[in-house]
Amino acid sequence: MRAVRIHEYGGPEVLVYEEAERPSPGSGQVLVRILAAAVNQIDVAIRRNAFPTPKQLPRILGSDGAGVVEATGADVDTVRPGDEIFFTGLSISTDGSYAEYALLPAAVMAVPKPAVASFEQAASLGVATSAAWYALVRRGALKEGETVLVQGGAGGVGSAAVQLARALGARVLATVVHASDVAGVLELGAEAVIDASADDVPAEVKRLTDDKGVDLILELIASENLATDLGLIVRGGRIVVLGAGPDPSLTVPTGAAIGVDATVLFANAGNAGRAGTAETLRQIAALVEQGRLKPVIGHVLPLEQARQAHELLEGHHFGKIVLVP
């Protein structure tokens, strides 16, 4: 089969489109013919060795994908050859989805593809949308009627969070750092979008909430925003930290946090486990089927252009980047 592998860590230039051995499913495993693979920031982190994992070089990148079940190993009775599925969670201890075929190490990872979604759309739902769901629902306990601020609404996780929060009955505010993204995030369902590069974010949030603040903040750049966030929540409000930002450590202004009875939660969707993540994807697929969530695709490139895809990912872009074998 053809695949994109890395033989060393580094920049996009280490991605090599080449022949690789096609895997065979063992007991409990599923072989998938990949029809689309999404490109994510975790792929970049692994490529740079900024996120060390058990899988050794050479390795195939790619956490997310969608395709058709090609074959199953023994003890698999939940999917059959020919089933259309999507998944997330590869490339940590296994090879990933940047290939014509990928091996799911556990059948529970194979989730039925929403019939109304293309393979490209389904592939784009993995890491980003499941992380947004985990942060908003599992950690943030989002309730219908609450007001949510998504700090960074134009990125993969942020754009998913805007749609999910709206679908779950919340009022959604969002920030962006490029004025060109305002219209796109409004189309996703945000009631208002604040251009953080030009506007006074605290003043705008206060204005939009009649000085009350928001119930929940999804924070993707915590090292830059956490201190400000504490002044934007209602008394007893929650801040869910999903992204550290440029500084790996945080300083919490204790007085400000105590003053508003703040709850600061940290979220790692990987802690849901394979079964928990698969259940999240089923919930997400149901929202897609109902027309309440629409994957946003920015670029679709052939698999052999994985290097260009990574270069696009590291620059300013809107919508998911997807590779097609």
Image: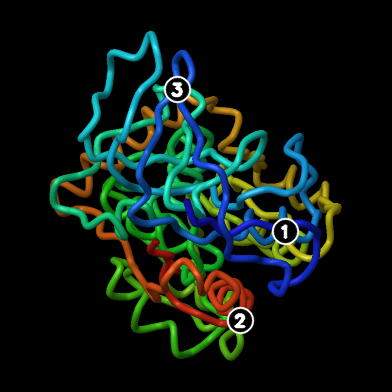
- The residue lying at 52 percent from left, 77 percent from top is 176
Residue at 43% in and 45% down: 101
Near mark 3 (Cα within 10 A), the count class, few <14, some 14-19 or many ≥20, is many
Q: Is mark 2 on a helix, strand or loop?
A: loop
**What residue is shown with label 1?**
47
Cα distance, mark 2 to mark 3?
36 Å
The front one of 164 and 315 is 315
Nearer the camera: disc 1 or disc 2: 1
Q: Which of marks 2 and 3 is in front?
A: 3
Secondary structure state at the residue bearing disc 1? helix
Q: Mark 2 points at which residue?
A: 315
The residue tagged 3 is: 29
Q: Which residue lies furthest to the top in this view?
A: 75
Contact between marks 2 and 3 (CB within 8 A): the answer is: no
Rendering colour mode: rainbow
Q: How far apart are marks 1 and 3 (CA)?
A: 25 Å
Residue 154 at what x, y percent from top left? 47, 72
Q: Which of marks 2 and 3 is nearer the N terminus?
A: 3
Q: Residue at x 80, y 59 (%)?
A: 8
Question: Which amino acid type is shown beneath numbered disc 2?
Answer: Gly
Q: In this view, does 267 lie above or below 295?
A: above
Placement of the C terminus among the 4 image quadrants: bottom left
